[in-house]
Amino acid sequence: MTNQELKQARDKNVPRGPFNVTGLFAAKALNATITDVEGRDYIDFAGGIGVMAVGHCHPKVVAATQDQSALFSHTCFHVVMYEAYVELARKMNEAAPGDFDKKTILLNSGAEAVENAVKIARYATGRDAVIAFEDAFHGRTLMTMSLTSKTMPYKKGFGPFAPEIYRLPYAYCYRCPLALEYPGCGVACADLLTDAFKNYVGADEVAAVIAEPVLGEGGFVVPPKEYFPKVKKICEDNGIVFIADEVQSGFGRTGKIFSIDHWGVAPDLITSAKSLAAGYPLSAVTGRAELMDAPHVGGLGGTYGGNPVSCRAALAVFDIIEHDGLLARADVIGASIRASFDSLAGELEVVGDVRGLGAMVALELVTDRGTKAPAADLTKALVTRALEKGVIMISAGTYGNVIRPLMPLTIDDATLDRGLAIVAESLREVAAEAGLA
Ligand SMILES: Cc1ncc(COP(=O)(O)O)c(C=O)c1O
């Protein structure tokens, strides 16, 4: 069947709620290339929304998952345990920053990891409130949707939301919430947390502060180096659990297994998912052993959490990241993206900001550099034009005006360069057509 025929069947049988960036149906995928059902190849700059760090169908992932599928695909860890779960937990504990004992629980999705991190923080502190940030995305379940900032499309019509969630502006320097400039600002945005204890919720009622070290859906915003040390110190001083949501920024994307390592901060709890298991559903909460052990026996878990096939995939991911040098490769990819985006910034007024960490490098588009008015329509046009030319790409940002490449870190140089050239050519074209070049 063609893409169009399948799309008709999709529209008839599947609700409109689950959005589709492209009208494509996949037939197969290898490394950074997806082939659709009509036999056309696309360069994958989306990686299934930051999931395929090790590329599609990496031979080690294929071998590990095939092997496990033939042994057993499910026993439920609560009923009959298996080594892959424990070994993966050990590796996560070892990889997470912090010179203290850690433990890891495995779950299914990013949202489920965040849900459990909040449960653990509440149980361990005996407190209710959670402080989250503007521009944050933490998932689509009740608690995580409530923690998520952007209303449309994530929250509209889905209330009432979970109570006891408070929100502060994030360290988004390009659109500074305090209209200050770094470094003269003294990273005053971090002090908003202390102010919040006076204005919104008492510090002794706050169980956790949750932050993405680098915003994912929020548009690859990278706070200054002083930001998280300050936030963490305020948490420590007030007995508050600091949760780093590394669902998108973790597992190699920024050149480290956990991006929070760039700030030299050891979170009390870390959530992981996405690139952890190369597309197999798996997520994790890793954290201080005493916090992780706080909930009573039977208080945490789920039927599928830490599925053995997913665990084997994740163990293969650890192996690939190490043996294929993917952390160093993320920096090389990031440098190529940045060079291409910087050159576009020199050429086109619509480029408002180029920023990032490792391979998480974003392009924020504006209709006017002075007012920084977001160019959401132009961003949509860019995504569409790039797709026509063979590159699958996704946008992001509270204003929908950010391009965020999330290609496999295993992408070869020629494919990366070809993809970046297509993105540049597409932006030049759509900017000219919009009268913005
Ligand atoms: C930072 C962050 N947290 C949580 C989630 C939710 O993950 P999932 O879609 O697997 O539930 C996402 C998904 O994009 C994310 O980027």
Image: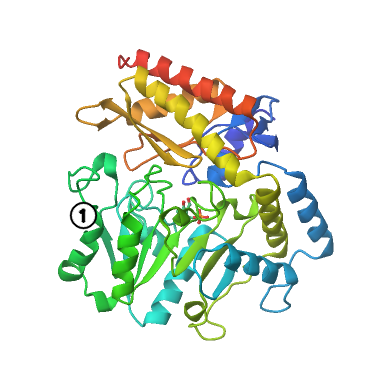
Q: Which residue is drawn at 82% across and 57% down?
A: 67
In this view, which residue lies farthest toward the left? 199
Q: What element carries label 1?
A: helix
What kind of residue is marked 1? Ala
Residue nearest the viewer, comparing 321 with 407? 321
Residue nearest the viewer, comparing 437 with 329? 329
Examine the image and state in which quarter residue 347 appears: top left
- Compared to residue 76, the image places residue 26 above or below, namely above
- Compared to residue 62, the image places residue 431 above or below, namely above
In this view, which residue lies farthest toward the bottom? 296
- Compared to residue 260, the image places residue 388 above or below, namely above
* 327 with respect to 196 (left or right): right
The image quadrant where one finds the N terminus is top right
Q: Residue at x 68, y 71 (%)?
A: 86
Other-residue count near label 1 (Cα within 10 Å), few / some / many at <14 / 14–19 / ≥20: some
The image quadrant where one finds the C terminus is top left
Examine the image and state in which quarter residue 409 appears: top right
- Compared to residue 39, the image places residue 6 above or below, namely below
* 318 with respect to 354 (left or right): right
Q: Which residue is drawn at 20% across and 27% down?
A: 370
Query: Can residue 403 be seen at all in this image of the molecule?
Result: no
Image location of residue 416, percent across then percent down: 59, 28
Image location of residue 116, percent across then percent down: 48, 70
Examine the image and state in which quarter residue 316 appears: bottom right
Residue nearest the viewer, comparing 389 with 32? 32
Image location of residue 356, percent across then percent down: 42, 40
- Tell me the residue that label 1 is attached to: 188
Image location of residue 215, percent across then percent down: 40, 48
Query: Can residue 29 be seen at all in this image of the molecule?
Result: yes
